[in-house]
Image (tube, helix red, strand yellow):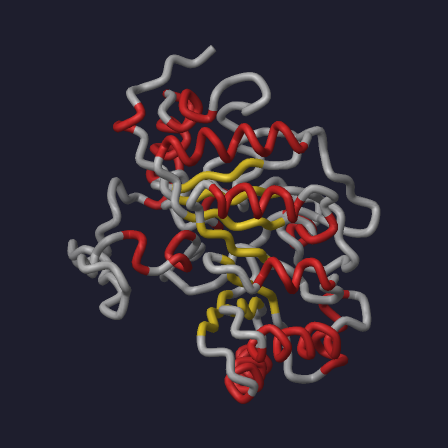
Amino acid sequence: MATALPVEQTTTGFLWLDLTRKCQLECVQCYNSSGPDGDHGTMTRDDWFKVLDQAAELGVWHITLIGGEPTMHPHAIEIASRALTLGIKVEVYSNLVHVPATWWDLLQREGMSLATSYYSDNASEHNEVTRRPSHARTRANIIKALELGIPVRAGIVGDNEQRMEAAKADLQSIGVSRIGTDHIREFGRACGSQNPDATNLCGGCGDGRASIDPTGEVPPCVFSTWMGVGNVREDSLTSILSGPALSEAVDSLRADWGKKDKDNDQGQKQPCNPDCVPKNPCDPRCEPNDACRPGTPRSECGPKN
């Protein structure tokens, strides 16, 4: 078993809980090849609860429930509720194809927010990506969430700039203000039979963040699923996040990008969001979307294709 550093030396503040590979859709560019034939893995309800309890002790302040479609996981509502009870903010990254009434109730609680992917203002173009007639339901549920006062952010992923700009304009027209864009990352279904290429990552994986997949494996982020550095069913979350395997993985990713820190090409620190709520504008908690900015140059995409 890995030897853990003291808790105060473990600086992870954000986790993706990658709950499931099951999804109603089968997007052509899905980063982890989720779909109708996917499953919920081997992590049990109690396993996820244990992760959350340890995360709270470590100072994790924000999680994103993702997949697959996280609302399809049988214990997702309990997992989200547990996190809120522990003082952890929860974002649910959903395709918004179907949102049960119980989810709408939960999403209106303080500390909850939604994220979704949106590919085009044109239904046929959006549906071409998702391989299902999903556009109308996703758009309608975005509108419903906004009407209920639920914070919503949207990620537009694609390689057609005109289509992406039209999608952004459509989202803005219905009231979405937090919109990120990025090109397609060649992982999962998007890379076909090719081996994953670490240079498709941003190089910041594992830096204050990590992911836990449906089997309990912990990669540095949801995109780097092949780089597991430990399993929460075998070792404590603390020992994994403060252990040598994660440090080695982070160093490897940074080496791939030729950077040893978060400085940009001019040697200046990346600017922080000046509009964030905490008193210190450079507090990493000022903008949850900073938890995933895959790509170089840095983008504002959500961690889901």
**What count of labels does the image hold?**
0
Which picture quadrant has residue 255?
A: top left
Q: Position of residue 205 (x, y in %)?
A: 41, 43
| Farthest-out residue, top | 1
Q: Is residue 53 left or right of residue 79?
A: left
**Residue located 35% across and 45% down the image:** 257
**Residue located 37% across and 34% down the image:** 250
Q: Position of residue 2 (x, y in %)?
A: 43, 14
**Residue located 72% across and 68% down the image:** 129
Which picture quadrant has residue 193?
A: top right
Q: Is residue 239 left or right of residue 160?
A: left
| Residue nearest the observer in this picture, 87 or 299 | 87
Q: Position of residue 262 (x, y in %)?
A: 26, 49
Whether residue 213 is situated above or below residue 189 in the rendered picture: above
| Farthest-out residue, bottom | 173
| Residue nearest the observer in this picture, 208 or 285 | 285
| Residue nearest the observer in this picture, 204 or 36 | 36
Position of the C terminus by quadrant: bottom right
**Residue located 69% across and 50% down the image:** 68
Q: Position of residue 39 (x, y in %)?
A: 77, 40
